[in-house]
Image (tube, helix red, strand yellow):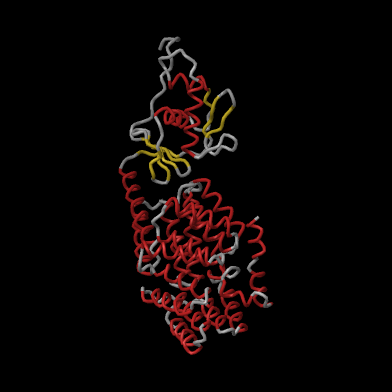
Amino acid sequence: MAEDQEEVKPSPARDRRVRFGAFEVDLDSQELRKSGRLVKLQRKPFQVLELLLRVPGTFVPRAELTRELWPDSHVNFYRSLNTAVNALRKALGDSWRHPGYIETRPGQGYQFIAPVQEFIADQAAAVNQDAYQNCVKARYFLNKRTQEDLHKAIAYFQAALHDDAGFARAYAGLAETYCLLAQMNMSSPGEAGTRAKALAATAVELEPDSAAARAAAACVKRFFEWDWLGAEEEFHRAMALDADCAAFHQAYGSFLSSIGNTQEALHELCVAQRLDPVSPAVNVEAAWALYLARDLAGAHEQCWKVLALEPSFGAAQHVLGLVYEQMRMYEEAVIELQNAQASGDEQPAVIAALGHAWAKAGKIALAEETLCRLQQLSDKRYISPYWHAIVYAGLRQNLLAIEWLETAYQQRDVWLTWLGVDPRFDELRAAPGFKSILHKMHFELAEAARC
């Protein structure tokens, strides 16, 4: 090779793909995807990304970038390079002050600083795409919030792992599903917690920069470890990795609502609604948060918005019944809770809500019947002691209510995460036993998470 001949750098191999964080780059088709979703990026910003990804961790001078991008020109294109880099940063959600992907040396050049994984888009990549599609299907059923649909979600997540045994998103989805199984009393907190912790840990180990893995870890810390500060930290990591996922904003909004951070909770849930406006799960979560915030008019309106989309959505009927009860519209409350009960699953949360409403309406015998029904169910499956406490609180048998809450504490029941904000326990909040449970759960650290 002649000495004055410019070295020709090899172009990336065809069909080569690169992953970093929640992003995947197809260098052949020149596509950038975030969590599987296509990110619009013009040609020059993509070329900048491609050049930096050729040598991740290595400083690339501005002069070299301009030569590569405008090889046939002798004009100074530094301003155009600035525009391209800024567009790339915007697509990645990156900041030049606090970079996660592209570090700038002012006036000198750039360096790609995030860990990069390369792989060949062969049959393995096709299998990975199948795994991704199975996870999409799983989340559809996950959002329907019924026992039957949760089993379908599990089947699709497991199918994704059959397609790709190292697919972190599937492990994260299964961890989230086990959190829901515990909430719906389809599994005991001990059993569900053990599975969820292992699945979330596997997801994080496989892909530390996966937003789904970090969100799953946050949910595990929230529901099974009562680690409020740890959950907050993991949610922040998930948001930094993927700020455009409605499910993450929904989960974070739910967490903030449970620790009493109403304003930020409603903000996160509004973001989730904007990202996925027709999701029944997202919309009913907003109604539940408004109910916990004692904004009964707002919760009432939100419930009816959900029911306009899904007229027989049991979760929305459940929350609407709770709202009517707090408004002392007991007849309407009973009707909506019975509607929720008729939607199937025989959810203990709905049975207990109905018992509480009967008690508040002065129908003591009917309220006591719900206690018998909860006891009958507990002979067949795990039933949270929280639900017995709800009915006893409605009957104003406060000592019995606190005894059942203490049992729930001993069992590490996930529903205690709402103990600090559930309106149905407002008459018990001054009781020493009630305060003791909140203290043992370290809710004062939850207060710290609000700051």
Rendering coords of residue 47 (x, y %)? 42, 28
As drawn, 121 above or below 85: below
Q: Quadrant of the N terminus?
A: top left
Foreground of the two, 49 or 85: 85
Foreground of the two, 6 or 379: 379
As drawn, 223 above or below 239: below
Q: How many numbered callouts?
A: 0
Identify the residue at the far bottom of this view.
Answer: 365
* Point 67% across, 69% down: residue: 439
* Point 60% across, 81% down: residue: 403
Q: Quadrant of the C terminus?
A: bottom right
As drawn, 270 above or below 144: above
* Point 44% across, 60% down: residue: 283
Rendering coords of residue 259 (x, y %)? 59, 62
* Point 52% across, 67% down: residue: 296
Foreground of the two, 427 or 446: 427
Rendering coords of residue 260 (x, y %)? 60, 62
Rendering coords of residue 16 (x, y %)? 37, 35
